Image (spheres, helix red, strand yellow):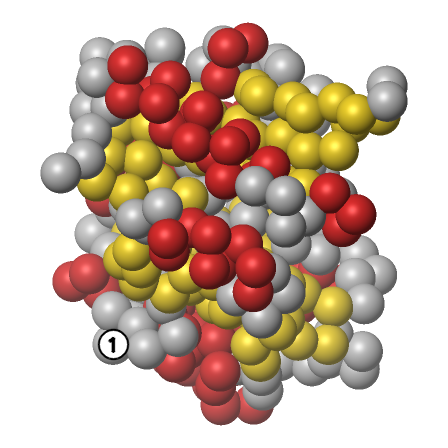
Amino acid sequence: RDKVLLDANFDPPGLRVAVRGGEIVGAAYGVRRLVAMTGTDREPDRGWIPFFFVVPDARRTGLGRRLLTDVLDWLRGLGRTRVDFASYTPHYLLPGLDPDAYPQAARLLGELGFRTRHEAAAMDRSLVGYRMPAAVLRRATDLTGLGYRFATPADDDLVELLRLAGEEFSPDWAWAIRSCLAAGTPLDRIVTARAPSGALVGWAMHGAYEGRNERFGPFGVLAEQRGTGLGQVLLHLTLERMRALGAHGAWFLWTDEQSPAGHLYRRAGFRTTRTFRVLRWEDT
């Protein structure tokens, strides 16, 4: 309901449902932007297929191919020349296709012309018995001595935080922060970092998505501040708060394993739980 029917971009013709004997046996969902994520850009050449499925006893009948083809034809008819599976923001269900869990879907999407753009990794770590590592605590102390400040944001900090998230990182992240706070998420789920100049240069948080306290992120540090240890400190300050609230673990859905963030998560004890292929179809 929340991710499809109440989405401002939902258009009923984009949701194709297969029914047999009164029972739903398959579906495919296509969407394009009717409302811009930021500014006025509705990305007029782009569409998404956030999900599709066919129940096991209806597979190998061509139903999945027909559902996906119908949705692709609908998006093409609306002028969409690029269609991504399944990374539709803000309401993606999974970052992409998990080929280990869904090998038949991987083959079908490949046959229909979807190609891998990159891979995303979901990670988690246990918080049972968690304590901030001594080296991270020392780095936090050193940074504080240099004039950096780590704190829970006040209401007056939110405009700056949303600008930082939306302009320097992703409009989707600004949307997530705005939405969760408007829904009542406490401000202490966020830790901000300010440089000695007073400028906001990073933040980390949890509980931003559907109120799930064990879900970490979004999380960002300005590029010019990376390598200072700020990211490591923000990550562990947030894990410390999560543990204090009784979280059994921490997890997130999407990072590049080979990126600086991916390496940071591994050093903090996170391990990959699933990998996803972010796929795109392009009209040739």
Residue 125 visible in image? yes
**Quick one: which residue is furthest to the bottom in this view?**
135
Residue 175 drawn at (x, y percent) = 44, 29
**From what the image shows, is residue 80 above or below residue 93?**
above
Q: Nearer the viewer, residue 146 or 232?
A: 232
Residue 176, position as x, y percentages in the image: 50, 34
- What is the quadrant of residue 25 in the picture? top right
Locate residue 107 relative to residue 246 in the image: left or right: left
Say which residue appears at 29% left-offset and 55% top-offset. 115
Picture layout, residue 24 above or below residue 85: above
Q: Residue at x 68, y 25 (%)?
A: 18
Drawn side of residue 184 relative to residue 112, left or right: right
Q: Could you say which is closer to the camera, residue 128 or residue 236?
A: 128
Examine the rendering and report whether any part of residue 143 can be seen: no
Side of 184 where 152 appears, left or right: left
Quadrant of the frame with the C terminus = top left
Q: Position of residue 200 (x, y in %)?
A: 31, 46
Residue pointed to by mark 1: 227
Question: Could you tell me the amino acid type at mark 1?
Answer: Gly
**In-image side of 15 versus 144 (left or right):** right
Q: Residue 244's quadrant in the figure?
A: bottom right
- Residue at the (73%, 76%) spot, across then down: 126
58 over 240 or under it: above or below: above
Pick out the residue farthest to the front.
61
- Where the N terminus falls, by quadrant? top right
For label 1, the SS is loop
Total marks shown come to 1
Mark 1, other Cα within 10 Å: few <14 / some 14–19 / many ≥20: few
Point 49% across, 82% down: residue: 266
Q: Position of residue 226 (x, y in %)?
A: 25, 69
* In the rendered image, the vertical position of residue 237 relative to residue 218, given as above or below: below
